[in-house]
């Protein structure tokens, strides 16, 4: 071999060695960068699934072993707005905040713009409307939830025979059913005296049932803010409160209306102490735990009139109830990336989808997910959705449920009359900017 050929061969070997070593070094670098542990936190405002969320976090870490997801539960009775405000004030905001849709606008300057995320195109139509500002999507719709009158079918049919929910079309129909149950010594209903249940959910129906056109509902709220609405003559408010008056006649807590707790509800309903409970599908884990042998439950709408053709007598409230937002102020780029990975894991990973739907019993607001929760309450909501018998309530101010909820508690207990309740609701709206 000539010297020239020898040198050429050696140079080739050296170049190959440099190339291979370079790639190997690069792989080590990438591996080390990828192996860096990242801790992210999720502030949970759904106390009923906190333990299940812990399980979901562990499942997520199996897919992303370098990410440690910690669940931070919000204390019972504390609003998501108050908790998150405190955390931002201390400079210790969670990586992911689970908040009510009404709170997204208040914190949007702290959140990451998620408009370019893949899941935006897969979200069910309308589920991003309330969390999109100037074309920017500032949150992730976490759950479609619904509420109304949860019924225990086993208890009803054991007491009065076969029960067909579709026969209850008016307020009078519902009261006649209550009378039959009461005659057989079964207490018809439990009204839990929780300010969020009364102020956000029950009274929320009055705002959402003003019109099928959501824009008109928001116009109604604008008029409330300027004192241009006379609630005394409002058909929907009066109809809803007429129903409330009827419900409290048959209330399990009739003699001590403000003494109940949330935890009491699943026990009473699941064990047949009451036939109905005004609540939402988020209560399923506790209902199931209280009586694992019974899975025959469903929703009845809260009737607001005696017109059998009234749409709102056959529809329940259902829509996005909780939003996940990623912090852009107190969390690093690595933490923000890990938080995005968690959201994408829920939507696109088969284990993530199963954890979301089966472990958390949540109806995901995404078209690409075909799984259905096993629980009967979720199935009931899905049937209402498919039949077009749902409506949404407008976004209400964050302090609506504690303030107006307190007024509803007084009305429930008979401390104030309806005219006084209307005055308190009117005065509340006059303070809202």
Image (cartoon, grey):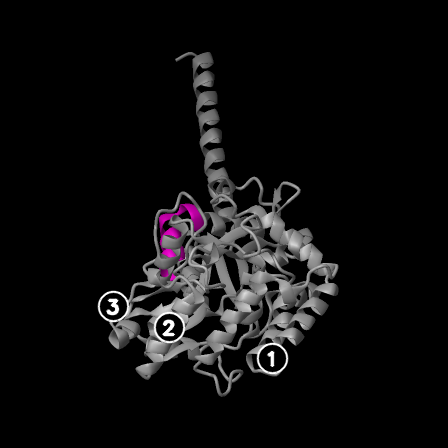
The residue under label 3 is: 162
Residue 430 on image: x %, y %: 74, 64
Tell me the chief SS of the magenta region.
Answer: helix
Mark 1, secondary structure of its residue: helix
Indicate the quadrant containing the C terminus: top left, top right, bottom left or bottom right.
bottom right
- Asked where in the image residue 327 lies, by quadrant, the reply is bottom right
Number of residue marks:
3
* Residue nearest the viewer, comparing 311 with 284: 311
Q: What residue occupies the far bottom of the structure in this picture?
A: 255
User: In the rendered structure, does residue 123 fall within the stretch colored magenta?
Assistant: no
Indicate the quadrant containing the N terminus: top left, top right, bottom left or bottom right.
top left
**Can I make out residue 337 in this image?**
yes
Mark 3, secondary structure of its residue: loop
Name the residue rendered at 54%, 75% in the picture.
Answer: 194
Which stretch is magenta?
Answer: 345-359
- Asked where in the image residue 116 lies, by quadrant, the reply is top right
User: In the rendered structure, does residue 350 fall within the stretch colored magenta?
Assistant: yes
382 up-or-down from 84: above or below: above
* Residue nearest the viewer, comparing 139 with 432: 432
Please tell me how crowded label 1 is: few (under 14), some (14-19), or many (20+) other residues with Cα within 10 Å: some
Of pointers 2 and 3, the one earlier in the residue sequence = 3
The residue under label 2 is: 176
Residue 180 on image: x %, y %: 33, 77
Q: Are marks 2 and 3 in contact (CB under 8 Å)?
A: no
* Residue nearest the viewer, comparing 342 with 334: 342
268 up-or-down from 387: above or below: below
Q: CA distance from mark 2 to mark 1?
A: 27 Å
Of pointers 1 and 3, the one earlier in the residue sequence = 3
Q: Is residue 376 left or right of residue 148?
A: left
């Amino acid at each position: 071999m000539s010297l020239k050929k020898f040198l050429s061969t050696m140079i080739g070997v050296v170049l190959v060695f440099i190339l291979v070593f370079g790639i190997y070094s690069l792989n080590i670098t990438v591996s080390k960068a990828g192996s860096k542990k990242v801790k992210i936190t999720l502030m949970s405002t759904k106390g009923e699934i906190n333990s299940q969320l812990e399980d979901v976090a562990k499942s997520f870490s199996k897919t992303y072993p370098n990410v440690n997801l910690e669940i931070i539960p919000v204390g019972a009775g504390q609003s998501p707005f108050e908790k998150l405000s405190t955390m931002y004030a201390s400079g210790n905001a969670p990586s992911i905040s689970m908040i009510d849709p009404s709170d997204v606008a208040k914190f949007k300057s702290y959140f990451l713009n998620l408009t370019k995320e893949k899941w935006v195109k897969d979200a069910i139509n309308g589920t991003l409307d309330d969390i999109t500002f100037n074309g920017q999507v500032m949150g992730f719709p976490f759950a479609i939830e619904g509420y109304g009158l949860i019924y225990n079918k086993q208890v009803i049919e054991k007491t009065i025979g076969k029960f067909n929910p579709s026969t209850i079309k008016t307020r009078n129909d519902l009261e006649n059913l209550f009378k039959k149950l009461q005659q057989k010594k079964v207490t018809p209903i439990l009204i839990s005296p929780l300010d969020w249940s009364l102020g956000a959910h029950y009274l929320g129906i009055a705002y959402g049932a003003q019109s099928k056109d959501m824009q008109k509902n928001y116009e109604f709220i604008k008029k409330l803010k300027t004192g241009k609405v006379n609630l005394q003559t409002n058909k929907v408010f009066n109809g809803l409160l007429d129903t409330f008056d009827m419900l409290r006649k048959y209330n399990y807590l009739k003699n001590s209306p403000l003494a109940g707790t949330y935890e009491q509800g699943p026990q009473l309903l699941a064990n047949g102490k009451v036939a109905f409970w005004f609540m939402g599908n988020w209560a399923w884990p506790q209902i199931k735990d209280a009586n694992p042998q019974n899975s025959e439950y469903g929703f009845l709408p809260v009737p607001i009139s005696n017109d059998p053709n009234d749409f709102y007598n056959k529809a329940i409230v259902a829509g996005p109830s909780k939003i996940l937002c990623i912090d852009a102020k107190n969390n690093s780029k690595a933490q923000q990336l890990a938080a995005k990975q968690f959201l994408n894991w829920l939507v696109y990973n088969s284990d993530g989808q199963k954890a979301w739907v089966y472990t958390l019993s949540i109806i995901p607001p995404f078209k690409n997910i075909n799984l259905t929760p096993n629980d009967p309450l979720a199935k009931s909501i899905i049937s209402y959705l498919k039949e077009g018998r749902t409506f949404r309530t407008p976004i209400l101010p964050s302090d609506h449920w504690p303030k107006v909820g307190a007024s509803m508690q007084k009305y429930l207990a008979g401390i104030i009359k309806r005219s006084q309740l209307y005055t308190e609701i009117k005065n509340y709206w006059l303070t809202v900017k």
